Each structure stands twice: as structure tokens, then as C-alpha cells.
Amino acid sequence: MGAKRVEDLIVWQLANELRDKTYQLMSTSKRPLDLKCRSQIEDAIGSSMRNIGEGFGRYYHKEFARLLSYARGSVFEIAECLTDGVSRGYWSNDAKQKAAHLCERTIKASTRFINYLRRTRDI
């Protein structure tokens, strides 16, 4: 049985949890984030969520897989921003671990779902 709503997808649920955890991390920053850094993180988070949603709305599996690959790339960008935040002194390495772990889980789920979509026929 397929998902009836985008929110039913595990990959969406993980990305949503990552969004919440990343915003929480940003709100507890040791010092204010510069606007460019904040904007880049917010754009990557938004891009990930929007591409999952847009892909869900597509009719063909290959189109959904393509949009999921964009979302996956955005999660990699979030992970890099989290690491950069440690270097800039915004948060500690320990503080970023929960969000970094969610990045890993979201990337794995995206990869598996992309592979599934690529090998199955459209309904």
C-alpha cells in the first residue's frame, strides 16, 4: 500500500525531524549566525522539504527519483553547514551530533527510496 500523503513517507518524516533539530540548534547558537550562513542553512532545509513534496506530486517514478536526488543533495549541504558551524564557533561538535545523525539517516532513506523508484514501474 502506497503513501496517501507526503507526510506518510519515512524520508519526509526524517527530513522534517532534521528541519526541527537544525532550527533548534541554530536557536541555541553560542553567538549570532551571520546572515549568509543562516540563509544558506534555511535554503537547504527548505529545498530538501520542497523537493520531497514536489516529487511526491509527480506521476512518474523517475521524476520523483530525480527530485529526491535534489533533496538528498540539500541534506548533504545541511550536513556541511553543521560542520561549518562548529568551525565558526556557533555550536560545539557535541551539540551538532543529533542533527548530523539525522542527516545521515535522511541521506540513507533517500538513497534507498531513490533506488526503489528507479527499479519499479509506474502505477
Image: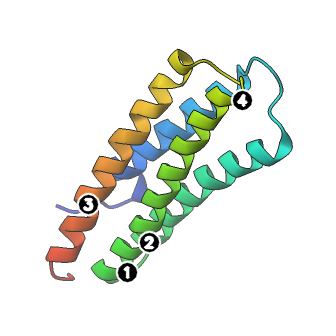
Alpha carbon separation for disc pair 4 and 2: 31 Å
Is tag 1's residue or tag 4's residue first in the polypeptide sequence?
1
The part of the image, by quadrant, that contains residue 119 is bottom left
Q: Which mark is residue 113?
A: 3
Q: Position of residue 74 (x, y in %)?
A: 52, 56
In the rendered structure, find residue 67 and report the number of the disc placed on it. Answer: 2
In the image, which is nearer the foreground, mark 1 or mark 4? 4
Q: Nearer the viewer, mark 4 or mark 3?
A: 4
In the displayed structure image, the side of residue 39 where residue 97 appears, left or right: left
The residue labelled by disc 1 is: 63
Question: What separation in Å lies between label 1 and label 4 (alpha carbons)?
Answer: 38 Å
Mark 4 or mark 2, earlier in chain:
2
Is the C-beta separation of discs 2 and 3 under 8 Å? Answer: no
Look at the numbered disc 4 and give the secondary structure of its residue: loop
Q: Position of residue 15 (x, y in %)?
A: 46, 46
Of the image marks 4 and 3, the number of the one nearer the N terminus: 4
The image shows residue 85 at horizontal and vertical percentages of 66, 32
Q: Are the residues flagged by discs 1 and 4 in contact, CB closer than 8 Å?
A: no
Residue 75 position (above or below residue 87): below
Calculate the distance from the C-alpha at mark 1 to the C-alpha at mark 3: 13 Å
The residue beneath circle 4 is: 88
Residue positioned 49% across, 43% down in the render: 16
Q: Nearer the viewer, residue 59 or 81?
A: 81
| Residue type at numbered disc 2 | Leu
Q: Secondary structure at mark 2?
A: helix
- Whether pointer 1 and pointer 2 mark residues with C-beta atoms closer than 8 Å, the reply is yes
Determine whether 30 is above or below 117 in the image.
Answer: above
